[in-house]
Image (cartoon, rainbow, N blue to C red):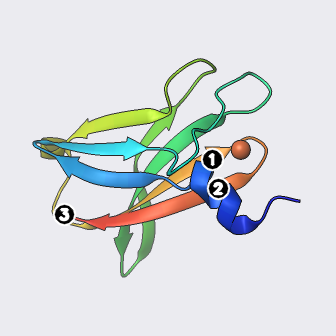
Amino acid sequence: MVSLAEQGKKHQPLVKIEWDKLVIVIWRDIEHPMEEAHLIDSVDILNVSKAGLLRVKHFNLKAEQEPKLEVNLSELKEWTYKIQARCNLHGTWEDEITL
Ligand SMILES: [Fe+2]
């Protein structure tokens, strides 16, 4: 059985800022498969506020697509965001960033 830590290496999104873009890569040390039977099928960017989580962007990913997204920082406000990536077999994984 694969440990949670091992699963995290290929599921937990890594979020970083590169120049004027928020870059989201959906794996850490081990690349996640992007096949019809097993893939990261969606990514949400949620605003973390006192009122709770508010989804501000949603992306659908398809098989063979690289599990990576870029968002122009001009599209986001200076808030704290949770980035959630959903694997069709292994559930939802997240990272957080404050702009
Ligand atoms: Fe998975």
Tag 1 residue: 86
Q: Residue at x 50, y 33 (%)?
A: 67
**Label 3 amino acid?**
Leu
Quadrant position of the C terminus in the picture: bottom left
Q: Quick check: 2 left or right of 60?
A: right
Gap between marks 1 and 2, in whole Å? 4 Å
**Label 1 amino acid?**
Arg
Classify residue 57 by image quadrant. top left
Tag 2 residue: 92
Q: Quadrant of ligand 1?
A: top right
Tag 3 residue: 99
Mark 3 element type = loop
User: Is label 2 in contact with label 3 (beta carbons under 8 Å)?
Assistant: no
Q: Earlier in the sequence, mark 1 or mark 3?
A: 1
Gap between marks 2 and 3, in whole Å? 22 Å
**Ligand 1 closer than 8 Å to label 3 CB:** no
Q: Quick check: 72 left or right of 44?
A: left
- Disc 2 crowd rating (10 Å Cα; few below 14, some 14-19, many 20+) is some
Classify residue 69 by image quadrant. top left
Gap between marks 1 and 3, in whole Å? 23 Å
Q: Position of residue 17 (x, y in %)?
A: 21, 51
